């Protein structure tokens, strides 16, 4: 996945056939990595208002997740935004909202697959043995990180970490 | 067609020292972001800029607090607004919570 041009409100990427397949496959893996429930309060003895807000949060995140999965499918199947280029792979055109949505979706997969792997602390040097059980989660983690890094660098105009 | 100028100070937007003092005393909710070993620093900075509209310098300052101190208090708001910000941050998979200010 390579950035071709960057202008206000519009990013254009070139995806090789392999990039395109890998991105689609990664996005479609999302149901395999459901996220852990998220809490609105750090204190288990949160007040009544916060307990009520937790239900709102759960519902809002579930709705957002459903809408995002559908929007990603629409994006990747919309020839105006993701079109095959004869002889040069695919061209992906993202406006600001599409870029944010794709960034969120990739990070959701990255964090979900990381949780599936047992939430290892790689920064602290924790090593993960590859086996048949965790292979898919590790693959999804690394692919989503790669696409996320490229997208984020394009969005911010900075170099990748 | 003559242009109608907008008043510089719109009705209802006048704040007095008394209002400021009242706001400072009002109970508020803190929006807190917690460290995790998975979200990338560049990503967290971008999310803070997007959700709060902060400049890069402020976003980096809070991101570094999260990274080095384990958490950062991002803002103090009314219950509804704090809830909104927590929702936004969690949509980006950040560990965000809210709690009443003591």
Image (cartoon, coloured by chain):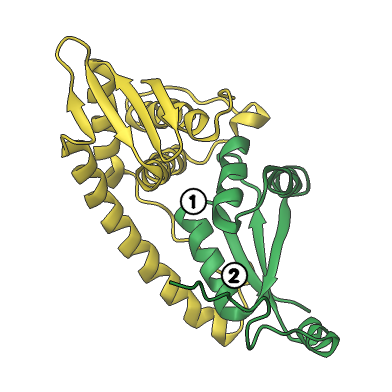
C-alpha separation, residue under disc 1 versus residue under disc 2: 15 Å
Quarter where residue B15 is shown: bottom right
For mark 1, what is the residue? Answer: B93
Residue furthest to the top: A87
Task: Specify the colour of chain B.
Answer: green
Residue B40 in view in this figure: no
Residue furthest to the front: B1
What element does badge 1 sit on? loop
Instruction: Decide: is A118 above or below B7.
Output: above
* Residue at 47 percent of width and 23 percent of height: A129
What element does badge 2 sit on? loop
Q: Residue B23: horizontal and vertical position, in percent?
A: 76, 84
- Mark nearer the viewer, 1 or 2: 1
* Residue at 40 percent of width and 68 percent of height: A58
Q: Residue B90: horizontal and vertical position, in percent?
A: 50, 57
Letter of the chain in yellow: A
Numbered label attached to residue B31: none
Left or right: residue A133 versus residue B10 is left
Crowding at label 2, few (<14), some or many (≥20) Cα neighbours within 10 Å?
many
Crowding at label 1, few (<14), some or many (≥20) Cα neighbours within 10 Å?
many
- State which quarter of the image contains the N terminus of chain B: bottom left
- State which quarter of the image contains the C terminus of chain B: bottom right
Residue A61 in view in this figure: yes
For mark 2, what is the residue? Answer: A41
* Residue at 60 percent of width and 55 percent of height: B53
Quarter where residue B73 is shown: bottom right
Instruction: Decide: is A134 above or below B59.
Output: above
* Residue at 61 percent of width and 40 percent of height: B37
């Amino acid at each position: 996945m390579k950035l071709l041009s960057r202008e206000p409100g519009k990013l254009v990427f070139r995806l090789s056939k392999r990039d395109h397949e890998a991105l689609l496959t990664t996005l479609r893996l999302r149901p395999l990595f459901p996220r852990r429930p998220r809490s609105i309060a750090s204190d288990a003895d949160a007040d009544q208002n916060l307990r009520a807000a937790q239900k709102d949060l759960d519902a809002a995140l579930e709705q957002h997740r459903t809408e995002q999965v559908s929007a990603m499918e629409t994006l990747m199947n919309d020839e105006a935004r993701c079109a095959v280029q004869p002889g040069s792979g695919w061209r992906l055109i993202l406006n600001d909202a599409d870029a944010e949505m794709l960034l969120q979706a990739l990070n959701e997969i990255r964090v979900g697959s990381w949780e599936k792997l047992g939430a290892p602390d790689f920064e602290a040097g924790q090593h993960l043995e590859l086996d048949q059980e965790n292979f898919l989660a590790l693959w999804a983690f690394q692919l989503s990180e790669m696409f996320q890094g490229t997208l984020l660098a394009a969005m911010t105009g900075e170099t990748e970490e | 067609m003559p242009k109608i100028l907008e008043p510089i100070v719109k009705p209802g937007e006048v704040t007095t020292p008394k209002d400021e003092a009242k706001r400072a005393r009002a109970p508020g909710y803190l929006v807190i972001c917690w460290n995790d070993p998975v979200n990338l620093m560049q990503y967290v900075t971008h999310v803070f800029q997007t959700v709060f509209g902060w400049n890069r310098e402020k976003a980096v300052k809070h991101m570094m607090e999260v990274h080095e101190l384990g958490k950062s208090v991002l803002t103090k708001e009314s219950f509804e607004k704090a809830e909104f910000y927590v929702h936004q941050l969690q949509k980006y998979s950040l560990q965000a919570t809210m709690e009443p200010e003591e």
